Every structure is written in C-alpha cells, then in structure tokens.
Image (spheres, helix red, strand yellow):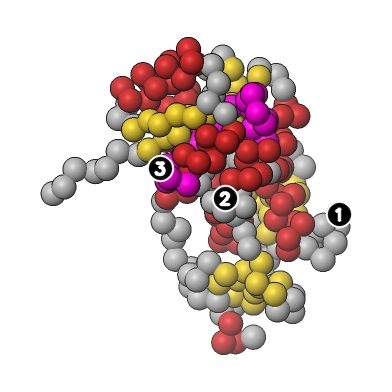
Amino acid sequence: MPPTPRRRILVVDDEPRMVRFIRLNLEHDGFQVSEAHNGTQALERLRNDLPDLVLLDVMLPDMDGFEVLGMMREFSSVPVIMVTAKGEENERVRGLELGADDYVTKPFSPRELVSRIRAVLRRLESPQPGATGPLVIDGRLRLDFDRREIWVEGRLVRLRPTEFRLLYHLVQNAGWVVPHDQLLAKVWGYEYRGETHYLRLYVNYLRQKLEQDPSHPVYILTEHGVGYRFFDFRRADGTAVPLAEK
C-alpha cells in the first residue's frame, strides 16, 4: 500500500520567527509546509502549490488578510484558518463571514494549532452520510442530500460545505430540538462544543439563503438556551416524504 501523502499547509505571515515556529511544529506532526510573507506571494503560492489548507495572518505588509481571503475566494475553496490578535472578536467574525473556515488567536500553543488544522480538514473531507432521496419540504424548498443540491423557489442555491453539513443534521432530526453542543460536535468537531458563536453565524447564513423572511424563519427555528429545530415535515410514522409522493 502506498504511503498516505502528507497534507500541504500554506503559512502566510510576515514574521520570520512565527513562520519558523509554525513550520517546525507542523512538520513535526507530519504536514508539508510552504510559506508566503505577504498577500501577493500568498495568492501566487495558492495557485502554484495547491495547498490543502491555508493558515492566514490578518496583519500583512501589502494588504490585510481579509483582502487576501476575499481574493482567494474568487478562485479557490481551499480551507482557510485566520490568525487574529487576542480578543479581537470583530476580526474573527469578519473572517468567518468572508469565507474563512476557522480562526486561531495569538498566542496559541502548537497543540491547539494542530488540533484546529486537523479538525478543519476532517470536517471538510469526511463523506456526508447518504439521505433517503430528494425531499420536498414545501412549495419553496427542495433538498437532495445525495446530489448535494438545495433548491429554493426553483433556483439552485449554493451552500458552503459547513452550511451543508449543518442543514443535513438539522433535517435528519426534523421536529426535534438539537442541542447546541450536539450540533457543534457533529458539524465542526468534538473540540468545538463550546463555540456557540459559530452556530449562530452559520444558522444565520442558512436562513439568509433558505428563508423567505430570515427575520421570521419557518424552517430553522431557535429554541432559546437549548438549540435549533428544523420544522417537522415528515409523515405520521416518522419517515421523510420522498419527492415522488409530492
């Protein structure tokens, strides 16, 4: 059996000491590391090296990490972990809204960094369990998890991988309240059970894409202090209604 190829990580940071620290620890854990020291180099490396994940610092000399992330998302869906200053919550939220998959705050330990990287790769690469077939939720919304297609009012809606996984777990438990920690563990990983701000943000993303009026949702309902519930569209016997019966 051929050896498993090492995952390639692109580290984007203009501080040589930080780059050396990250490189040593990631290579020790079996990753292959390339580096870029500004935004322009990062975009070039991304095109040429095709990394499996990008570790992107917010503070760069030629443009900030948010600009780089926006330009990356124009041509690549590579997982990105933002590196932010400690306590800068607005930076973390902004990065997630622009399409980052996670963030770490300085200072961070090697164990935390590796754990975050492995969690993001595991989340995005793990296969999605198959569904029973296309589901017509109502006259507006149709879901086909096997084909990874979401249709709203006859229009195909594109979901990010994390949005798709979150919707899948909510729909699979339609009619039942799914607690915050359970959703976080299923969608993001066991390490994220306390990171409820991720959940709030991605539920909002889904509502913006699926709901007719996101401020008054009918599909994804909040159970305050407990979790979220997808409205019950199933038969009386608990089985989902397939497309052929609609």
Q: Where 244 falls versus 30 (above or below)?
A: below
- Identify the residue under disc 1: 215
> Which numbered mark, 3 or 1, is in the foreground of this view?
3
Task: Kindly tell me whether residue 144 is visible in this rendering.
Answer: yes
Q: Earlier in the sequence, mark 1 or mark 2?
A: 2
Q: Are marks 3 and 1 in contact (CB under 8 Å)?
A: no
Q: Picture coordinates of residue 45 (x, y %)?
A: 47, 39
Magenta residues, start to end: 47-66
Q: How many other residues sit within 10 Å of disc 2, few (<14), some (14-19) or many (≥20)?
A: some
Task: Kindly tell me whether residue 190 is visible in this rendering.
Answer: no
Say the numbered circle drawn on residue 49.
3
- Which residue: 31% across, 22% down? 28
Q: Nearer the viewer, residue 16 or 167?
A: 16
Secondary-structure class at tag 2 = helix
- Location of residue 144 by image quarter: bottom right
- Identify the residue under disc 2: 162
Q: CA distance from mark 3 to mark 1?
A: 42 Å
- Which residue: 45% across, 34% down? 10
Q: Picture coordinates of residue 229 (x, y %)?
A: 68, 54
Q: CA distance from mark 1 to mark 2?
A: 22 Å
